[in-house]
Amino acid sequence: MTIVLLLVTFSSMACIFWYTDWKYSLPTPVPATYRPVKTGAYIELAGKLPVAPNKPVFVHFFNPDCPCSRFNVPFFKALVRKYGDRISFAIVVLNNRSYTERQIKDKFDLDLPVSFDSTVAAECGVYSTPQAVLLDANHHLYYRGNYNKSRYCTDSRTSYAQMAIDSLFRNVPQPIFPGLALKAYGCTLPVCTK
């Protein structure tokens, strides 16, 4: 009886893990109100994010309730450590619950600008989390997309956000990324329903 109970328990856990993994591998549905924003479009950040002038800007769109966003935190922190002296980093929290700036800074263990302004997401064409947006020094959209093919951001061959940063600094046109880089995968906004 004990063996059967253990077998049922482990089988149930495996099914839940498989279902959750499958669910987050599907693209996030595009909202009916979505307005696409093309690469090269000027993004107005004045009054929305305190970023340094004449410097590229990297905006991390984050939802504390989204598992994909939580898995992504170490990778984002690694980007900040690697490029923080050459890029203005900022976090935009997209969530319908109340979080404070201090809670978000503590979660990331970083002293970065934090905004709760959802209009920044609309301006950048973001409708799910986590998403990365990279603007050139003139605040033109250079990259909007996923950090990595892997939900856990562990596949170095598909570190799309880092590849975009590197190509921006090499002063070359944005590389051509596969669909996995540019199609939103993760949690819908503002409520994580996926």
Image (cartoon, grey):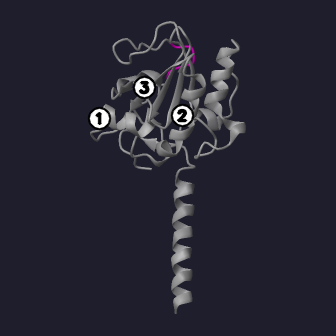
Left or right: 164 as drawn, with respect to 58: right
Residue at label 2? 76
- Residue 185 visible? The answer is no
> What's the magenta bit mostly, secondary-structure-wise?
loop
Question: In whole angstroms, how far apart are the C-alphas of marks 1 and 2?
Answer: 20 Å
Which of the labelled discs sits on residue 100, or is there none? Answer: 1
The magenta segment: 37-41
In this rendering, is residue 142 above or below 184? above
* Residue type beneath disc 2: Phe
Residue at label 3? 112
Residue 181's image quarter? top right
Residue at image point 54% right, 40% down: 74
Count every numbered label the image shows and give the total.
Answer: 3
Tell me if residue 51 is in the magenta stretch: no
Residue at image point 51% right, 33% down: 131
Question: Percent from the top left, x then y, of residue 116?
Answer: 33, 29
* Residue type beneath disc 3: Leu
Q: Residues within 10 Å of mark 2 (few under 14, many from 20)?
A: many
Residue occupying the far left of the picture:
98
Question: In whole angstroms, how far apart are the C-alphas of marks 3 and 2?
Answer: 12 Å
Secondary structure, mark 3, is: loop
Which of the labelled discs sits on residue 22, or is there none? Answer: none
Q: Residues within 10 Å of mark 3 (few under 14, many from 20)?
A: some
Residue at image point 58% right, 33% down: 78
- Residue 110 visible? The answer is yes
Left or right: 49 as drawn, with respect to 42: left
Q: Residues within 10 Å of mark 1 (few under 14, many from 20)?
A: few
Question: Along the line of sight, which residue is nearer the eye, 2 or 191?
Answer: 2
Contact, mark 1 vs mark 2 (Cβ under 8 Å): no
* Residue type beneath disc 1: Thr
In this rendering, is residue 27 above or below 115? below
Secondary structure, mark 1, is: loop
